[in-house]
Image (cartoon, grey):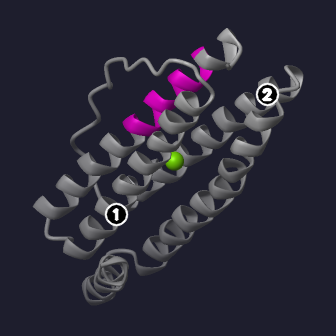
Amino acid sequence: MLKKKIEKAFNEHLNKELFSSYLYLSMAAHLDANGYEGMAAWMRIQSQEEYDHGMKFFDFINERGSRVTLGAIEAPKKEWKSPLEIFEEAYKHECYISKEIHKLMDMAIAEKDYPSISFLNFFVDEQVEEENTAIKIVDNLKMVGDRGVSLYMLDRNLGKRGAAAK
Ligand code: MG
């Protein structure tokens, strides 16, 4: 079984991953409503990934003979000024999640909980990828600025993630 403090922290993190999923789904809805179909598809896949991350915590807590407890998921923001603002926020959110994962790792190390350390290693690596992917899109959006044709092309390109995933 997980130590009580780790069980509590993992349950709280499960909620954070589910919130991430909800936040990206809200971003997808906003992008879709504003005609950015490709980015909306990209964000929707991102939302699914975050749900899967949450489920990894769900399964791990169960596998360790501990108890999953689900709390309320905070309502996400609904409106943004631009795709750039959306992806900047997604990047900042991933940096926050990385810090939270590192805190969990600190706790697992302090408690000498080797299975949890091994489990969390996946997330340490995953967060490097998540931050990198988000910042690259932010950079691309800055490069494109408000040039309509380029923005359209970028939107189309990001939409290919959806096609590749299906
Ligand atoms: Mg995640």
Q: Mark 1–mark 2 contact, CB under 8 Å? A: no
Q: Residue 45 carries which label?
A: 1
**Disc 2 target residue:** 108
Rendering coords of residue 14 (x, y %): 48, 31
Residue drawn at x 36%, y 77% is 165
Residue drawn at x 46%, y 22% is 68
Q: Can residue 158 be seen in this view?
A: yes
In the orientation shown, which residue stands out farthest toward the top? 4
| Residue 29 on the magenta span | no
Rendering coords of residue 110 (x, y %): 88, 22
The answer as to whether callout 2 falls within 8 Å of ligand 1 is no
Query: Regarding mark 1 in the picture, which secondary structure is present there?
Result: helix
Residue 77 vertical placement versus 50 (above, below): above
Q: Is residue 80 visible?
A: no
In the image, is 24 to the left or to the right of 4?
left
Image quarter in which the C terminus is found: bottom left
